[in-house]
Image: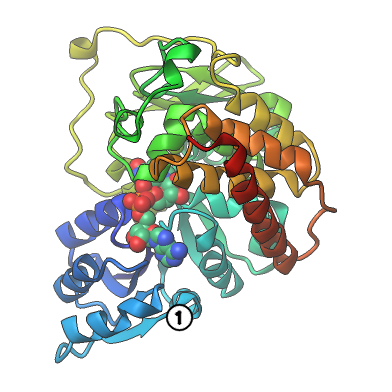
């Protein structure tokens, strides 16, 4: 019986994780569930799974949560500190599925106790970079990538030495605007941008997929998870999202992981690791599919890719600034304060205006994240609709 804590239990990845856990009650039990403030979903999931603890990050929602769980014996808590404390409690596996850098403190708590962390929350790793991977080594923690591409690479690498890798090929769907002219992207609405052709996901990552900043963040994520050198990580557009990524070895063998696009496959891999478990995912039917296509990414129409690669190749602070500015800009786009093309423009402006020294501690990462958000907020004004 594995005990599981889910950080971000009410989201898209959190919900898929709960689905798998609830289909396998003999294999998993829930230690703690956390959410920002979606009390109804959190309380319902805590009741169904008989979680020991339920936490909301937003303190104003605590009253509603404790009312919803009154008489159940399920402990409740609130505040960002309480989310971090929940992550610090011993458990066999922590699913890190909070969106954004807000997930970094609890992920680091799980790292410090030497836990096994199923990492969906890419923004945490992008911002902290080697400060996280060094801590993982120091505390003998284990990171299991849940992001479908990284999970695919992890599966293709199993047991291999990184020296034997020639290239990592990160596949990208290209998002909903893959075939659009850049001029036409200027007027897209949040409703159009969140409609991903292959995956159903939270709003933030859906917008990131549309700008292709998601692939930029994933490039940084891959660099930290599989340190082969960023120049050896290539991005290929593959519109069907069936090949989730590939590893090209020095002997010419290319290993790929395939599957119907359903996050429950990489989540199940992390939940059951090092074993495997069944999922209700549709089996892959290649003959119905007929073909798989591949294209070079278009850096002109999707400048986020080059901006992210540039940030990765600069100082260690650059990816944290890139991520923070992107979080602010995506929020502003969803709130209809800026246009679609302004998202990456705000990120570029922020990177141009802010060049701090490399962070040596997590506190310095948080300080850089805060300052970059302030600058990005200011930058929004020059792009207001
Ligand atoms: P989502 O928006 O659906 O859910 C986010 C979860 O985080 C919710 O439970 C929410 O309550 C919680 N949350 C939000 N802000 C918080 C805060 N400040 N403090 C504490 N909790 C907070 O997001 P998602 O699509 O499930 O994505 C989660 C993470 O997984 C992201 O980093 C995303 O990039 C990554 N990811 C998602 C998918 C996917 O298919 N959805 C695929 C790959 C990677
Ligand atoms: Mg991904």
Left or right: 11, with 312 as reference point: left
Left or right: 241, with 72 as reference point: right
Left or right: 312, with 144 as reference point: right
Figure quadrant of residue 334: top left
Residue positioned 59% across, 43% down in the render: 381
Is label 1 in a helix, a strand or a loop? helix
In what quadrant of the picture does the N terminus appear?
bottom left
Residue positioned 45% across, 10% down in the render: 181
Q: How is the protein colored in the picture?
A: rainbow
- Residue 138 horizontal/vertical position (percent): 70, 66
Total marks in image = 1
- Residue 225 horizontal/vertical position (percent): 61, 45
Vertical placement of residue 78 versus 146, above or below? below
Left or right: 11, with 122 as reference point: left
Q: Does residue 275 appear anywhere in the picture?
A: no
Figure quadrant of residue 271: bottom left
- Residue 164 horizontal/vertical position (percent): 67, 29
- Residue 382 horizontal/vertical position (percent): 61, 37
Q: Which residue is mark 1?
A: 82
Dividing the image into four quarters, tell me where ligand 2 lies. top left
Vertical placement of residue 15 versus 313, above or below? below
Figure quadrant of residue 113: bottom right
Vertical placement of residue 253 versus 216, above or below? above
Q: Nearer the viewer, residue 28 or 363?
A: 363
């Amino acid at each position: 019986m594995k005990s599981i804590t889910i950080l971000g239990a009410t989201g898209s990845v959190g919900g898929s994780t709960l689905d798998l856990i609830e289909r396998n009650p003999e294999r998993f039990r829930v230690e703690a569930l956390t959410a920002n403030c979606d009390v109804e979903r959190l309380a319902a999931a805590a009741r169904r799974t008989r979680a020991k603890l339920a936490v909301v990050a937003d303190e104003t929602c605590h009253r509603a949560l404790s009312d919803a769980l009154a008489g159940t014996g399920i402990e409740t808590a609130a505040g960002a500190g309480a989310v971090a404390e929940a992550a610090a409690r011993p458990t066999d596996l922590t699913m890190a599925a909070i969106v954004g850098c807000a997930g970094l403190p609890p992920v680091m708590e799980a790292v410090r106790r030497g836990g096994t962390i199923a990492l969906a929350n890419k923004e945490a790793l992008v911002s902290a970079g080697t400060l996280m991977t060094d801590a993982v080594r120091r505390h003998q923690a284990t990171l299991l990538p849940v992001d479908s591409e990284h999970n695919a690479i992890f599966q293709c690498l199993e047991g291999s030495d990184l020296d034997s890798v020639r290239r990592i090929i990160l596949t990208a769907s290209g998002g909903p605007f893959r075939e659009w002219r850049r001029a036409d992207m200027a007027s897209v609405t949040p409703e159009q941008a969140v409609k991903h052709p292959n995956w159903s996901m939270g709003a933030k990552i859906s917008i990131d997929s549309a700008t292709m900043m998601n692939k930029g963040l994933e490039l940084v994520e891959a660099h930290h998870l599989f340190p082969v050198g960023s120049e050896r990580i290539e991005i290929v557009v593959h519109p069907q999202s069936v090949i989730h990524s590939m590893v090209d070895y020095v002997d010419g063998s290319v290993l790929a992981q395939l599957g119907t696009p359903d996050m429950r496959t990489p989540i199940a891999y992390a939940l059951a690791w090092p074993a495997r478990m069944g999922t209700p995912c549709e089996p892959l039917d290649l003959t119905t599919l007929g073909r798989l296509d591949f294209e070079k990414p278009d850096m002109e129409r999707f400048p986020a890719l080059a901006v992210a690669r540039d940030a990765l190749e600069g100082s260690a602070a650059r990816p944290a600034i890139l991520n923070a500015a992107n979080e602010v800009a995506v929020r502003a786009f969803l709130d209809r304060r800026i246009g679609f093309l302004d998202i990456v423009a705000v990120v570029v402006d922020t990177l141009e205006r802010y060049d701090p020294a490399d962070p040596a501690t997590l506190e310095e990462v948080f300080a850089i994240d805060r300052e970059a958000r302030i600058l990005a907020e200011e930058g929004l004004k020059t792009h207001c609709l």
